[in-house]
């Protein structure tokens, strides 16, 4: 599952920075209920790109250095990304993919030996360019699969955008909305490729942990 701006980038960043587990949930109230069950849990996420007032933090990957998340469990709810996770609950396995860990996702997928479907969260029901780019980056070199035309289109988009990735991400609809809200640094961080070598993978209890 891919939500490059920003949910899956944030999940992978938190885990790479030492969070013990991340639970993506669809609803704000559901997230609050998990927080109530344990003081130790960090309650984070966004609606309209900013955290609800009673939350411990937002959906910016830059908010979660090791000093903030090391050893913590985190519950995350976002407008599109965590809804997409909820809709994929019946999958045999699920990983969170982004540009920052595209190669690691590809390696994980190869290692599972399973058929793969890349689900792009998009934005409120519409295609989100950055998710196509991340899907294309993950597909790059994934040769043991028969690609659909959607996969080919994502790969071609990725190849075309690769030389000016940051500019492309900043100009995308969601990227531009984040820039307008003062979050250009988030978009630039999310536009980096393969800076994280681990993958957030869903465990049997629904919590995502490093693979
Ligand atoms: C989402 O799930 O809609 C997002 O990750 C939005 C964002 O916080 O940029």
Image (tube, rainbow, N blue to C red):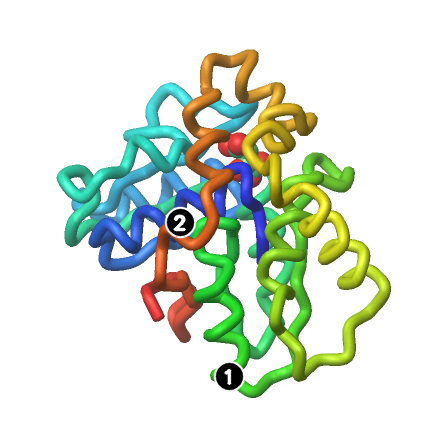
How packed is label 1: few (under 14 Cα within 10 Å), some, or many (20 or more)? few
Residue 131: image x %, image y %? 64, 46
- Looking at this view, is 200 or 151 the one in front? 151
Measured along the vertical axis of the image, is residue 53 above or below residue 44?
Answer: above
User: Would residue 137 be seen by someone viewing this image from the given angle?
Assistant: yes
The quadrant of the rendering that contains the N terminus is: bottom right
Residue 155: image x %, image y %? 72, 57
Residue 53: image x %, image y %? 38, 19
Residue 21: image x %, image y %? 29, 58
Q: Quadrant of ligand 1?
A: top right
Q: Which residue is mark 1?
A: 112
Q: Between marks 2 and 1, how big is the CA–CA gap?
A: 21 Å
Nearer-N-terminus badge (2/1):
2
- Identify the residue at image location x=28%, y=30%: 56
User: Would residue 78 be seen by someone viewing this image from the given angle?
Assistant: no
Residue 205 horizontal side relative to residue 112, left or right: left
Residue 136 horizontal side relative to residue 53, left or right: right
Q: Which residue is mark 2?
A: 11
Q: Secondary structure at mark 2?
A: helix
Q: Secondary structure at mark 1?
A: helix
* Residue 22 image-quadrant placement: bottom left
Measured along the vertical axis of the image, is residue 147 above or below residue 56?
Answer: below
How packed is label 2: few (under 14 Cα within 10 Å), some, or many (20 or more)? many
* Residue 9 image-quadrant placement: top left
- Looking at this view, is 89 or 157 the one in front? 157
- Identify the residue at image location x=52%, y=27%: 47
- Identify the residue at image location x=66%, y=78%: 143
Q: Residue furthest front?
A: 163
Q: Residue furthest right?
A: 149
């Amino acid at each position: 599952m891919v939500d490059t701006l920003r949910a899956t980038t944030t999940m992978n960043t938190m885990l790479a920075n030492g969070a013990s587990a991340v639970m993506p949930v669809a609803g704000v109230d559901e997230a609050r209920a998990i927080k109530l069950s344990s003081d130790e849990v960090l309650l984070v996420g966004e609606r309209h790109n900013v955290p609800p007032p009673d939350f411990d933090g937002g959906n910016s990957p830059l908010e979660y250095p090791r000093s903030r998340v090391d050893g913590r469990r985190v519950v995350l709810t976002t407008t599109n990304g965590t809804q997409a996770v909820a809709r994929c609950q019946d999958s045999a396995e699920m990983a969170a993919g982004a540009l920052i860990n595209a190669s690691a996702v590809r390696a994980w997928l190869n290692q599972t030996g399973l058929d793969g479907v890349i689900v792009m969260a998009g934005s409120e029901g519409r295609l989100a360019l950055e998710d196509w780019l991340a899907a294309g980056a993950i597909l790059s070199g994934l040769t043991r699969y028969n690609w659909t035309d959607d996969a080919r289109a994502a790969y071609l988009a990725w190849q075309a955008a690769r030389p000016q990735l940051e500019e492309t991400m900043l100009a995308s609809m969601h990227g531009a909305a984040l820039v307008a809200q003062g979050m250009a640094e988030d978009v630039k961080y999310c536009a980096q490729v393969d800076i994280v070598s681990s993958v957030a993978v869903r465990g049997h209890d629904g919590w995502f942990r490093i693979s």
